Image (cartoon, coloured by chain):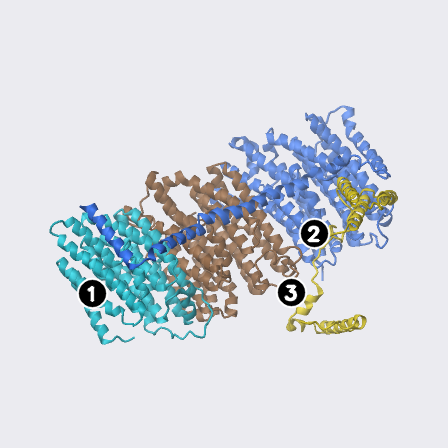
Chain colours: A cyan, B brown, C yellow, D blue
Amino acid sequence: MPLSSSQILFFSTLMLGTLLSISSSSWFGAWMGLELNLLSFIPLISSKNNQYSSEAALKYFLIQALGSSIIIMSASFMMSSSELATTLFTVALLLKAGAAPFHFWFPSVMEGLQWNQVIILMTIQKIAPLSLLSYLLYSNTLYIVPAAIITSALVGAIGGINQTFLRKIMAYSSINHMAWMMSAILISETNWLLYFSFYCLISSSVAILFNYQDVFHISHIVNHTPHSSHMKILTFTSLLSLGGLPPFTGFIPKWIIIQEMVSSHMFITLAILLASALLTLFYYLRVAMTALTISSPKTKWSTKSTISSYMTPSMIYMNIFGLLAPSLFTIIL
Amino acid sequence: MLKFMLACIMLMPLVNSWWAVQSSLFILTFILMLYCHHDFSNYMAGWCFNIDSLGYILILLSFWITALVVCSSQKVLKENNYPSLFLLVNIFLLFFLIMTFSANDYLLFYISFESSLIPTLILILGWGYQPERLQAGVYMLFYTLFASLPLLVSLISLYNMSGSLTLGLVENVSGAGFISCIWYVVTVFAFIVKLPMFLVHLWLPKAHVEAPVAGSMILAGVLLKLGGYGLIRVLPLFGEANKNLSWLWVSISLVGGVVVSLMCLRQVDMKALIAYSSVAHMGLVLSGLVVFGWWGVNGAVVVMIGHGLCSSGLFCLANMVYERIGSRSLLISKGLMNFMPSMALWWFLLSAGNMAAPPTLNLLGEISLIISVVSWSKVSMLSISLLSFFSAAYTLYMFSLSQHGKYYSALFSCCSGKVREYLILMLHWLPLNVLILKGSTVMFIL
Amino acid sequence: MSFLQTEVICHSRKVCSLYKRALRNLESWYDRRPMYRYRAVLLRARFDENKDVKDLRVAQQLLDDGEKELFSLIQYQPKKFPLSPGGVAYEREVRAPDWVLDYWHPWEKAFYPDYFAKREQRKKEYVEWWEKTYGKPAEQGH
Amino acid sequence: MVSMYLSSMLFLLSGSLSCLVLSLLCLKSGQAWFIEWELLSLNSSSIVMTLILDWMSFMFLGFVMFISSMVLYYSGEYMHGDSNMNRFMYLVLAFVMSMGFLIISPNLISILLGWDGLGLVSYALVIYYQNEKSANAGMLTALSNRVGDVAILLAISLFFSCGGWNFLFYVENMPIIGSGGLLCGLVVLAAMTKSAQIPFSAWLPAAMAAPTPVSALVHSSTLVTAGVYLLIRFSPALEGRLSQTVLLLLSSLTMFMAGLGANFEYDLKKIIALSTLSQLGVMMSILSLGYADLAFFHLLAHALFKALLFMCAGAVIHSVKDYQDIRMMGGLVYHMPLTGMCMNLANLALCGTPFLAGFYSKDMILEVAFMSPINLVSFLLYALATGLTVCYTMRLVYYSLSGDFNLGNLYSISDEGKIMTNPMMGLSVGAVFGGATLAWLIFPCPYMICMSPVFKMLALIVSVIGGVLGYLLNLNAVNYNLNSLKYYNSVVFSGSMWFMPFLSTYGASKNFLGSGETYQSVGDMGWSEYYGGQGIYSFIMSSSKILQVFQDNSMKIYMLSFLLWVIVLVFVVV
């Protein structure tokens, strides 16, 4: 799907906003970057002229605007009461990142997006809030972030169980991963970067797969999957990788986070995170189930061709062979 | 060990020709057998892998069972049911099993232990028969994962404590305080679920019933043994805590074994019966292991090998019946002796193995286990006697119901056994009964 | 499924069944024929005595009493013919029903060409005989 | 082509002859060979496969092989035309092999090879016929025997404290083991199941569902004596233990019960089985009095004539077309004189008629028993059982051999099948001379027996009374008014082995099968699922639904709730 020129423009301003906010030295600059980011994502969302995308755009705009307004408000408190300011900052950033308990907008916005915008929302749009959050870890906010971790883990895990829409499932999965990322933030920046980059790789590979198969619902996978075995392998490897099952790449960031959390004695949080990881795996598995049952009914209207050849090995590499050289990744970061 | 892993990897390109993979697996088994002159300490070491006698015998078992699995799943080839993918999955499974049994490092062990789940899951979901296989697969995956994620935490804590996860270099967790006990429970629980112990065994009958013959064989033959292997590896680290808590596992597994045996008597599904009987046998293995006497541990290893061969053979037999009659129900597939008189001999021999009749490895192992558990407490004699009695009861129930008497009247046209099938059964039975002549070959350390 | 009574059994059949069972029971107790005959005549007389009872309530009562009496005197090892149900040699060997041969694969049949040729011949003759004796079966409507 | 029955007969016969010769050599020189194969050595105690070859095992082995060669030859005709005859032959050979392993291993672990093997092979033999009766009988047999196997397994675990399992070395000083009493109890329990003593008696008559040659070999002369044999080897350890007393009481009770039951039994084979049971009781009781050599003597002599008796019964059953009910026989002596002769010979030997095989052992056992300080109950049971033996023998003879033929007339009854009568003749020789020969061989110096004339004559008197009583009772049975019906309850009680068959089948299985179902529905499909897979799944599903309710709101509410959070936080912080 070639990008139109306006999309390219907005995409670059989107990136610019992100960069601006994470590299700015003042909260005002950060706010400006966030606003730029927000305003350039709106046209990207509503590139398809239907009511779903415009509804999603509206919702996104309202929520982000609310978050931004809180940020600009608390920036003004910074001088008088820095405690209050940091608290409000944290809450607003959590809202912007879509972490529980401020996650309510996230699934419903995801619902109206195309897969490539989903990828942007899941990855690029998280960069700015999360990195701002990582600057904010003063002692007085330390009780908000763990609470957000726990709620995100639980909400992400439990919320996705009953879902049948793939984008909602991805939304909840993203909320759950947010919990892991926030705990990584609590530990160290490097861990967070590591986890985040892995998450970006894996979740976008899943989304790309879904995009190629043009599926939006669990039952579509049964009908639309072209019957090539490497497609099936791709589907379930990337989904299980997203779930963090050992032989796949997704296990590495989890392993590292677990190790760091154990060394910093965060056992209670860790227990909740692990339990939630199990639940998320359950709904990934439900999606992957059709791929795992090797022989499935053929439908004549499955028109989608198989995924282009250069994608397959790269995605398999991304999802399987990561485990072979985990140290490589730590060196890079 | 790397040479065998590389051999496995090199088998992967061959998956398009069934015979090549099959014969290569047998040849590899044979080559591995040649290494049986090992010197009983760490052996064939290199690059995080080494084997000792325990690992050796279990790797040999994995090779053997995988070769037999391929041999007995000819139906996949015949019906062109994705044969090359099937072989690929099996080779992957074998690869992960070799890694698990030869890993020199707890974390590597953990990773490959978990990895072996995926090919098994694919086997069950991909080549199973009924729609219920989805549930079975989910049960298997989640029961195992539920218990093994805490294991990861525990292993990493061990790493934090002693700075290494190499087998033998990890410090022991001393004391039997609250923390040590929790740590202990978290660590062993993964293996206890995998074994499985009564109360957390629900995944096993489901998985066995729904799995294709390959899945059942390898599940019963090798994968359950991962639990026992893991216990043998981690229990030495938790001496004190284990001593304090072993009563819990022994009592649950022995009483549970009796309960499971009673349930076996009510099964009408052949595979479910065999699966439940595995639970009962593994109960004894678990109690021998947590008692952690020399006899108990060695007996557990022997039973693991014996049970691996025997129940895998029984699943194979159940599948042969299923392929002919199309049902696993004992009410329909009955009176088979009239169709397949020679097969009835194999049924009898393998059933005898299942009830630990001499001269099978199972008997040797069970004797050692009973010795160990009875020396631990005489009260256990009560449930051990019931366990042992009922193991005969349900095995004979299965044998007589499936082989003896009139056959189902709606049944016509059923061919007798084929040479390939007799060969498979023979290859299950022979090691089961011959290895006892030098019982120490299958022991942990001599 | 003999324990499930699926139809209404009339009173006289019940009486007859009781009579027969009682006779068999006597036969098991009295193993010498003359003694058994003597007893059997007496038994018959007892049954005959009440054969004209018209009141079903009385008859039912008599039947129940008879059943009770039989139960209280049942022989612990009833005489059974070896090849009939309950006998020692009943179903000792499982024999495949004849029609199984019809389901053999043609290749399998080809191993015994003479036998199957003759079998086909016999079947045809049997059908002819059937149609001659009982007439052609009516066309089955759907 | 040499048929299988012939070749196995020749093979076993030669084996038997060589075993007997070796036994004589050992007896003369007092030698014994001891062969060990180490299976495993751990903690310096080793599991070994041990074989002991002394006069005792050689002699027993010789007898077993002799009887089995006769039986195999005999089954050449008895099983003629059976479609699975080869399976039968192989099974019998496997049986002989396991019996051999049992006889020659004095090690508690290696004896399991024979012990379990006997149980399994005899199971396969009992279910040889495909009817439901034999399936049930086989299950009862196998499971009753399994109780003994389990007892041996537990005994092995207790024996562990000795550091080895060659019980021959340890039986002399068993008291040093802490739980010696329990150990002896378990061994006695094992022997009792194999030899069908009282709580486990039900399987022996039930096992008569097997083909008659099997009964002749397995259920009369060899398998059932395995328990006795084990205790013979084990007897020094039992001295003065509680288990010995219990065994004495139970075995005399078995003796009496079986003798009584045989008098009310109608199945030809079951009568003989009950008589076997009674003789087993004799062996066990004399063993529990401490006379192991007498028990061994009776074991061998009994094997000879009991196998003969079964073969005769088999010949009868074969020629009357599977009828086993003695009410349907009678007058057979006119039709099959040779068989009748052999049957009478065996019967007389069983009763202990002077100078036949049973006399030497039985008479000596009774006299020794009467001489020893034995309690009154056992004494009475002994005397009664001896009388009852003669009584049921008379009854058997009366019903089957004499009188008129009670069956229809469409049978060709004769005993001209040489394949069946020849082995009978062979065993008859044993039944005549066996006792005397054994007495000379085993007891080089005579037992000292010292008792009053009344006691000396007691055995004879009881036998004569029993015989006369048996005859009178049978005459009495030919009656227009049956006395059995007057004492209905007691007749049924004695005729059905004191209800043991019901208790050990229905009584045992009912509770276990019921609880199996309960556990299945309440445990595995109930609580285990509730606190396992299904319960967690439904909990999570319902909580997911609750979460979904929060999710289904308008944007406004989300934003308001966020503002509420902010306000709350502001208050908390400030």
- Secondary element at image label 1: helix
Q: Nearer the viewer, residue A73 or C134?
A: A73
Return the x and y of residue B59 as percentages of the image width and height.
43, 56
Q: Quadrant of residue D354?
A: top right
Q: Is residue B441 above or below residue B383?
A: below
Disc 2 to disc 1: CB gap under 8 Å: no
Total count of labels: 3
Mark 2 is surrounded, within 10 Å at the Cα level, by few (under 14), some (14 to 19) or many (20 or more) other residues, namely few
Q: D512 and B184: which one is in front?
A: D512
Q: Name which residue type carries label 2.
A: Gln
| Residue linked to disc 3 | B412
The chain identifier of the residue carrying mark 3 reads B
Residue B19 vs residue A15, the one in the foreground: A15
Q: Give the amino acid at mark 3.
A: Phe
Q: Which residue is mark 2?
A: C5
Q: Position of residue C64 (x, y in %)?
A: 76, 43
Residue A18: x percent and y percent?
Answer: 19, 64
The residue lying toward the viewer, choosing from B44 and A312, is: A312
Q: Which mark is on residue C89?
A: none
Q: Is residue A66 above or below residue B233?
A: below
Alpha carbon distance from label 2 to label 1: 82 Å
Subunit ID for the residue under disc 2: C
A81 vs B196, left or right, is: left
Work out how far the residue at label 1 is from the one at label 3, CA to CA, in angstroms: 74 Å
